[in-house]
Image (tube, grey):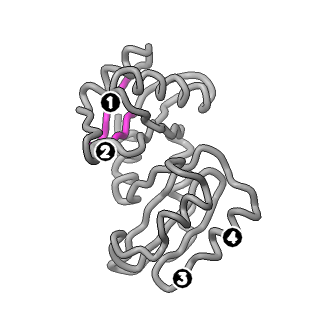
Amino acid sequence: MICVAFLRAINVGRRIVKMAHLAEIVRGLGYDDVWTHINSGNVVFDAAGSRSRLETELEAAFAAEFGFETTTFVRTAAELRRALAAEPFSLVPGDTYFLTFLKSAPSKAKSAAFEALSNDFDTVVVRGRDVHWRMHGKSTDTTLSTKAWEDFIGRHRSTSRNTTMLRKLADKIDTR
């Protein structure tokens, strides 16, 4: 099955990783058809096994190679397409739309409490292990604090990607 690993906090600050090196590591684990998409820690590969086993194996290999923890979120290509198709809100010009990947689905109560933080600028909708996050403007202007995210899911337990980039990635997967 085609999988995508989204690595948290790669090529930010001192956590620099060349994408060719990242692909080498994944190939070294025995996965096939490995390639990366842009320079922010998105690696596509063909693999069998459970999501949790893939994440654990990738995280261990990355930590051993890079010398720092690299929280990794795996989605199948089909899961990525379903998440992108959900579109839980309308967009207008100037909006920013992120998909935030979580390790596990939060409880209904926790999801509802986080969604209740939505306001005139930020709208969040939790769907299983994914959070759809729309901002009426730039992401740097968000009103959702790091503390609010950490209260919801814990520290360093998510990674976000712009849906424009994710759609390009999904299209690239489809054309390969």
Q: Is residue 160 left or right of residue 155?
A: left
Q: Residues within 10 Å of mark 4 (few under 14, many from 20)?
A: few
For the question of whether residue 106 can be seen, the reply is: yes
- Circles 4 and 2, Cβ within 8 Å, touching? The answer is no
| Three-letter amino acid code of the residue under disc 1 | Trp
The label number, if any, that marks residue 51 in the structure image:
none
Q: Classify residue 9 by image quadrant.
A: top left
* CA gap, disc 1 and disc 4: 38 Å
* CA gap, disc 2 and disc 1: 13 Å
* CA gap, disc 3 and disc 2: 29 Å
- The residues colored magenta run 33-43
**Closer to the eye: label 1 or 3:** 3
The residue drawn where x is 55% and y is 58% is: 150
Q: Is residue 32 left or right of residue 22?
A: right
The label number, if any, that marks residue 35 in the structure image:
1
- Circles 2 and 1, Cβ within 8 Å, touching? The answer is no
- Circles 3 and 2, Cβ within 8 Å, touching? The answer is no
